[in-house]
Image (spheres, rainbow, N blue to C red):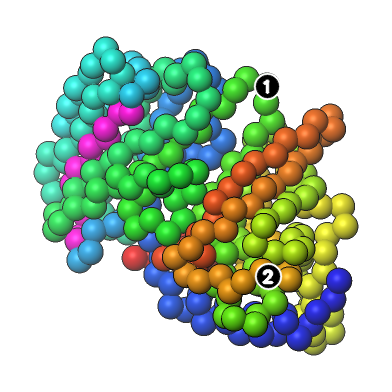
Amino acid sequence: MNHPRIAFKTVAAYAMLASTAAAFAHVTLPRGGATVGSDYDAAFRVGHACEGAKATTGLAVRLPKGFLLSDAQARKGWKLDVQKKNSGDGEVRWTAESPQAALPANERAEFVLRGKVPGTPGPLWFKVLQTCDVGSVDWAEVPASGTSTAGLKSPAARLDVVAQGVATVDVRDGWVRQSVPGQSGTGAFMKLTAPTGARLVGLSTPAAGVAAVHEMKMEGDTMKMRELPAGLDLPAGQTVELKPGGYHVMMMDLKQALTKGSTVPMTLRFEDAKGQKTSLDLNLPVGAPEGADAAAPAHQHKH
Ligand SMILES: [Cu+2]
């Protein structure tokens, strides 16, 4: 399916979005999750976050219920306080003992703790208070439904507890570009990671008559998009990004204008190498999230 005229319009709009969206250094855990009941090293990635601050001076991780802490890694020059509870919650706190030990704004670091994850699958949310020489950020927002943190200003760090032997696909930062009345199509974007490899073979949404995965390619001097007939390959452990100007979910025959702030339900269907089929229900927010272009490597460490 070629529709170059739409492509040109959307590309222009994307370029504008990219230049206005601010990069944001969220506190995150690595993708891929943890298997039910396993011992897990939670390595929190911390970057610069506090407005106008020069360094991060403290990090306090509130442990979610069901996560049984066994250990926390000490940091040189940092005081470690561990408040352990048998019920599984509690807190681990690192505090820089001197300005020299603090984490400079232009550096990133991992803060590691270890514990046992629950025996039932589902997301675990670790709320993290990041304290700086000036101000603090509480990474404590949890989505009202689903697991997408897109649109949240200061999301908690998410850990997916996954069932053993089930091919799961991690979906992050999903969003749908808003549309105006009369507009027939728009795009949806997200980051997909399949720990053991999979293929995105289909998708559907009640918001559009047709939804398909497209790629964008220059043909001569024309940007064209076309449907990927065999679906989108998700190599094991690699994050594949659907983003403006690249792979995207093309939504055609929109049922109505998609306004910023609303959400769009979408079902993704996957198939693994053995032919096993899984599906995933998402609720994608409409509107480019703050930091929508943060995935571009050049922007990642900037404030
Ligand atoms: Cu398209």
Residue ID at (67%, 57%): 206
* Residue situated furthest left in the rendering: 98
Q: Nearer the viewer, residue 24 or 122?
A: 122
Is residue 231 placed above or below 45 in the rendered structure? below
Kindly identify which residue carries mark 1. 165
Which amino acid does the dot numbered 1 rest on? Gly
Residue ID at (28%, 15%): 87
User: Disc 2 or 1, which lies upstream in sequence?
Assistant: 1
Q: Is residue 250 visible?
A: no
Is residue 254 placed above or below 73 in the rendered structure? below
For mark 2, does the 10 Å Cα neighbourhood hold few (<14), some (14 to 19), or many (20 or more) residues?
many
Q: Nearer the viewer, residue 48 or 68?
A: 68
Q: Quadrant of residue 83?
A: top left
The overriding secondary structure of the stretch rendered in magenta is strand
Kindly identify which residue carries mark 2. 254
Residue 55 is one of the magenta-drawn residues: yes
* Residue situated furthest front in the rendering: 255
- Count of picture labels: 2
Disc 2, SS: strand
Disc 1, SS: loop
* Residue situated furthest top in the rendering: 86
In percent of width and height, residue 63 lies at 30, 28
Residue 277 is one of the magenta-drawn residues: no
Q: Is residue 285 left or right of residue 196?
A: left
Which amino acid does the dot numbered 2 rest on? Leu
Q: Is residue 195 left or right of residue 33?
A: right
Q: Quadrant of residue 4?
A: bottom right
Q: Nearer the viewer, residue 20 or 296?
A: 20
Disc number lying in front (2 or 1): 2
Location of the N terminus by quadrant is bottom right
Residue range (magenta): 53-64
